[in-house]
Amino acid sequence: MIAEGWWRGKVTHMTGTNAPRGSGAADGAPASRASRVSRASARELIEAITDPGSWSGWDEPVEITTDDPDYRADLERARERTGLDESVITGEGRIEGRRVALIACEFRFLAGSIGVAAGERLVRAVERATAERLPLLAAPASGGTRMQEGTVAFLQMVKVAAAITDHKAAGLPYLVHLRHPTTGGVLASWGSLGHVTAAEPGALIGFMGPRVHEALYGEEFPPGVQNAENLMNHGLIDAVLPLSRLSGVAARVLRVLCAGEAAAGGATASGPAPDPGALGEAQAVPDAAAPPASAVARGSAGTAAEAGTGTPGDAPDGPPGRRGGSSAGGGPSATSGNGRGGAEAAEAKGAAAHGEVAGGRWDAEAGPPSAAPGHVVPGGCGAERGADGAATAQAAGAAEGVVAGHGQAGVAVFAGAPEGAGGPSAEVSIRASRRAERPGVRDLLRVAAEDVSPLSGTGAGEHDPGLLLALARVGGTPCVVLGHNRRSARKGETTDGPGEGQALGPAGLRTARRGMHIAAELGLPLLTVIDTAGAALSREAEEGGLAAEIARCLADMVTLPAPTLCLLLGQGAGGAALALLPADRVVAARHAWLSPLPPEGASAILHRTTERAYEVAARQGVRSADLLAQGIVDRIVEEEDGDGPRGGDGPRDVDDARGGDGSRALDASRTPDAFLRRLGHLLGAELAALRDQDPDERLAARRVRHRRIGLPR
């Protein structure tokens, strides 16, 4: 907790409980507290904190492309109500004379929710801020993932967090001002990665919105937990700060974080600031600010930023197991005026990481505009260390029968069926994944692994039964294994509801990060196993920094130098699943699924009832076949052979699936050991292939993989 005097102003404390219901926040954030919490629009916020006449918008127009008539109508109404074309505004302005990039949510636009278009806009803005060496200020006010767009929208949080981590790895400040309300995936990614984080007085800040919690568990969330003042008291944010003081405090913080730079017209960025423009107006990137087309981003940059077991909001020390030099650095720049080491970075092995600019936009296929590994970037804001990650090339086609991969240019090429076609229905798979007798990560290690050595907790006095960490040889390949610890259903529990599972809390995520560090330090492959009904939803979880720990796991997973393989084994609900997902390769069991929330929670948001859960899940594209088509999954393994295994114990892949009309439900609970033996062989081969890849190409391909999710292929 920071003393009020440090901010030279009195912290305003507001009381009141978190309302359980509201109007349309994507993760269930309420609107009824607006009478107690002043909610400035995104434009009003920008006008309040930037110097008069200094704002220049970066946003290009976004078209409505959905075929869903209801969603199209929602978007059209939101545009008419706000005068904006999406839920986020990006651009730059000056704060007490210093050029600063800004990204802000407009809550009145579908509750500030993030879909593919909003996610791409955010990433482009962060990448541009990094290229132009600008400090970045984020002001989210969001319910989280846009439920109408489903799982592919959920995955946008990975690439936004990755871009933020690149920005920080380049030695550039990232400040966050959490507005009312900020919940869900936004809080669990870019909302929790700031070097310095403040929130507006009385703001609702929490991982799970109160309405969703009540819909899933039949009771209101404890009052007084998910508010800015309580989170500050627990060390999760640095200050409670009204909008009227944000500009002055941001300027003061940046005078320290950008020490050595002129506040205006100097080394804050190459070239003069763009001409002022109207709020929200699309502006072309000035030629003087555009990076050279030859600049290649090579670095490892990371995702949603969780770094260590310290207070959420602290800056991470960098990717585990990776050392980077730091300097306040002088010396001439090797680039043409943008403060990046283009000449050295151009030698990167990845071929698709150009930061090319076309019409003022970063090439969507390019990696982040960061510097070469360990390169000290002179003359930039807080220049300390360059990032090292982003390029191309997919993992070498690991085990026999791989059904999807990446081309040499880093663009995903998938052999799966179109979204929504083939395979069992969403309802069939979700029910199968929830069966009490379905095998979990412990069963996998029992049947398919040797030399298993379980590790306990974080190594710093914390233990969470929801996360299993072990050293093992899986399919003959030594690796670090971390996975969700599936609990057997209680007596009388059915597959009709989300179940509780072994809920994963902040300590479990810190245990996962311990496993990531071990893999990085020893050069061992990392196998993550996803099988979770969701993260812990409690006072203890919120006050223990659940959202920030998810963000740090995302950052570590994207930047980890070790080979990484993710197994989507069963349920994949929410941030607890997302935290273990961003790997080099993803293998899915046929009935595994991935969703922004348990389907019942998504149904509660969209329809105010849990009765339409399976219908919502089908529209969201949560099935393994949908994930394959979207490039989220690389390979699907059938759970039961039916006529017996072909070619010995080799696994049957998606092309061998019989039926395809969703009428049958052959699943791993029928013959679990046979399924796990086949799966173990596959995983061992995948891990070995990843281990044998060139590390730079593998890491670069990982970055391209997640940067491209949701974009046209």
Image (cartoon, grey):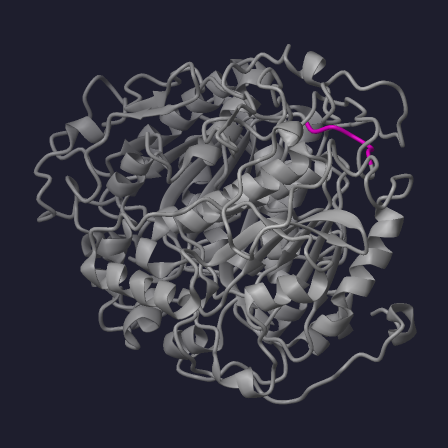
Q: Residue at x 42, y 63 (%)?
A: 83
Whether residue 227 is visible, yes or no, is yes
In screen coordinates, is 599 left or right of 223?
left
In screen coordinates, is 408 left or right of 459?
left
In screen coordinates, is 55 left or right of 620?
right
Q: Which quadrant is the C terminus positioned in? A: top left
Q: Residue at x 72, y 41 (%)?
A: 134
Q: Is residue 30 above or below residue 250?
A: below
Question: Looking at this view, is 271 or 368 the one in front?
Answer: 271
Q: Is residue 526 magenta?
A: no
Q: Residue at x 24, y 19 (%)?
A: 648
* Residue 181 x/y as whole percent: 55, 72
Q: Is residue 143 above or below residue 479?
A: below
Q: Is residue 241 above or below residue 372?
A: below
Q: Is most of the magenta stretch helix, strand or loop?
A: loop
The image quarter containing residue 182 is bottom right
The residues colored magenta run 383-387
Q: Residue at x 55, y 45 (%)?
A: 58
* Residue 490 x/y as whole percent: 37, 69
Q: In this figure, what is the number of numbered marks?
A: 0
* Residue 585 x/y as whole percent: 44, 29
Q: Which quadrant is the N terminus positioned in? A: bottom right
Question: Looking at this view, is 706 or 665 the one in front?
Answer: 706
* Residue 320 x/y as whole percent: 70, 35
Q: Is residue 386 magenta?
A: yes
